[in-house]
Amino acid sequence: MAKLLRIFLWLTVAALGTLAVATIALHRGEQISAMWLVLAAACTYALGYRFYSKFISAKVLALDALRATPAERLDNGRDFVPTNKWVVFGHHFAAIAGPGPLIGPVLAAQFGYLPGTLWILAGAVFGGCVQDFVILLFSVRRDGKCLTEMAHDEIGRVGGFVAYVAVLSIIVILLGAGALIVVNALKSSPWGVFTIAMTIPIAVLMGFYVRRLRPGKVLESSVLGFVLVILAILAGQWISQNATTAPWFTFTAPTLAILIIVYGYAASALPVWMLLAPRDYLSTFVKLGTIGLLAIGIVIWHPTLHMPPLTRFVDGTGPVFSGSVFPFAFITIACGAISGFHSLISSGTTPKLIRRETETRMVGYGAMMAESLVGILATIAACVLQPGTYFAINSPAGIVGKTADTAAATISGWGFPVTADSMHALAQAVGEQTLFNRTGGAPAFAVGMAQIFSNSLGGQAVMALWYHFAIMFEALFILTVLDAGTRVGRFMVQDALGHLWRPLGRTSWYPSILATSALIVGAWGCFLWQGVKDPLGGINSLWPLFGICNQLLATVALCVATTIIVKTHKARFAPVTLAPLAWLIAVTFTASWHKMFDPNPRIGFLAHARQLAAGLPSHEVSRLIFNDRLDAVVTGVLVSLVTLILLESAWLWIRVVYGSKQVEVREVPFVMTRFAEEQG
Amino acid sequence: MNLTVWLTRTATLFVSCMREIFDESAYARFLRRGRMSSSAESYADFCREQAASKARRPRCC
């Protein structure tokens, strides 16, 4: 009877999921409720987790409940700590959820809500969740080794080197793109700049509280910090409306870019850890709270999606970024569907906390599903906006024109009506001078989120507060990623340079710290500056480049996973990782080809350089040409390196399958767990 | 399991999760490991240890 009931339950879930996906895919000409997206996501995740992840656990990975994990065998109370699975789940989710799943889906909404939604669901269930799960498990079976070490051990030296270069590249490009998003969100916005500036004294106060007044009480200090940030947002309104104070906090994009570059260098090179650590906690607190609030707001308000399922821009002529729906929708949304960066988290801290091997399924596969849901929420936040408003915010001046009237006329001409007056009214409602040309995704997400929040709580009167809360949340979040990423990049460079000259590898030697920090900040600062000066808005070049890097890192992770599966004589199950790998190769290689060689100057870097070279020469034009060529070279080098690791892996797989190579798996030997008597 | 027990367990789990994410559990383990009591000095030591390991941890995009 119970079995029949279960079958009936899962058939109902499948039927509901099919209905929801059919509704979002087949409805044309009328608007649908956002709840269809939420229902489609919930049913897809439930089915994926119940059936696909269970199949992978049982057949492909053969999870062993009796095998002791490194957290148990090497328990030292510091790095290796057997931890409750729900706690690890929360910890892992907090670590993988970054700005990516919020920004990517907002940008991809230029194609309509359908391509992004389908890719987020299918990409997560068959790609992202699988990658996170298998890499986590393989790392657990190797004492928590990181991805680059596993690539080196299982594939070879080329694998290790490629993984290292891919990680460093993705960090640099991510930081450049992230900084550009912050600049575009804060330019000409005294309210936003004031709020973000105030997080510095607030963090210092939090640091004092947690170090002196109540040692170790981080949660308390984070709540205190959160209350102070809300007060800062309220004060920001007054600052922005005061004729004397507003100019103090009003900056152009280049000025903000310089300030962020200086901040990044100081955060990496100076001993300001006690400022950064409390800010990091504050950012996590705001992040988790805001994602929770957004989910609740959407369920309470269940808004209508104004964006059509498909827009005319699937042909590649979109203003937000150029390129057709294939492959560009699939590299624009990386986090939320499949993100190579997750493989670094799945092979970093998390495997050292896993108490039992069987729990990797819930933590690896499950936490990625939660992040995918964040991607769906971001899609909803972008698509509740009127399409004309969405394109007015996200289109660069270089495409729609520099004045409000020309921009409104251009966008209306595309079939998405918008007026300069309506945009002015919206800008006033959110406390900004203008919302035209605010490229990067963050302002559009903030307006959508403010609409959802104000409709669920507080009404239109508090729209401006919610908007600046959203901007503060995104900027704080990205700046935290920026200072942490700069330090991680600096350590990676120091480790590498230490092989050339030992003192350079000493992480406490100040000349080395200053030089390597300058190297990393200079690298992402270069991308940031090129984005700020780009007449097409910068994000048109940087975000696809970031997506390509991220997916190439996922390609490396899936190569490692496939190699281990093949080596354990389970080649018949290799399609579990080979299928997403093949898809990623198709997507990233096609996208890379377009970004390098497409004859359309809005897509191809080299075509754009040629177009510029044909015009009047100037210092500015020479710099833009150099930027295009640099982007093309970076893309080409990354693709070449990943081709190397693919060839090396494929050669290994063929030899193992045909028995011409004896292989051994580098797993640690089996040790019986002392938790064996527990269930599960 | 009745509702009160379930709610209590869920709340306990939620707090544990928050304490782990915000390193309060790590600090408690640090104190246990060194047989220390909580103070400004021991928290400063803990922060130094954390800084060394956390600084190398990438933050996801």
Image (cartoon, coloured by chain):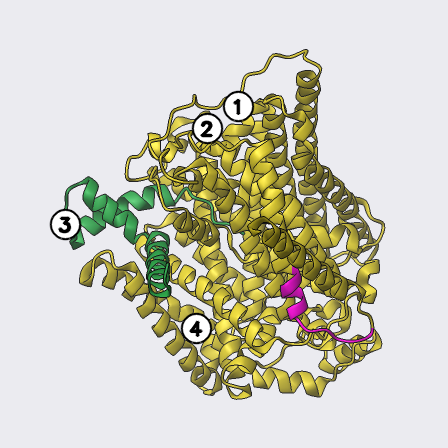
Chain colours: A yellow, B green
The residue tagged 3 is B37
User: Which residue is rendered at x = 76% and y = 74% of the image?
Assistant: A401
Q: Separation of disc 4 and disc 3 at Cα?
A: 37 Å
Q: In the figure, residue A210 lies in which quadrant?
A: bottom left
The residue tagged 4 is A195
Q: Amino acid at mark 3?
A: Ser
> In the rendered image of this protein, does residue A81 appear above or below residue A625?
above
Q: Earlier in the sequence, mark 1 or mark 2?
A: 2
For residue A153, which numbered disc appears in the image?
1
Q: Earlier in the sequence, mark 1 or mark 4?
A: 1
Depth check: give the residue in front, A641 or A534.
A641
Q: Position of residue A433 (x, y in %)?
A: 59, 81
Is there CB contact under 8 Å for labels 2 and 3?
Answer: no
Q: In the figure, residue A611 lies in which quadrant?
A: bottom right
The residue tagged 2 is A142
Helix, strand or loop at disc 3? loop
Q: Position of residue A86 (x, y in %)?
A: 41, 50
Name the front one of labels 4 and 3. 3
Is there CB contact under 8 Å for labels 1 and 2?
Answer: yes
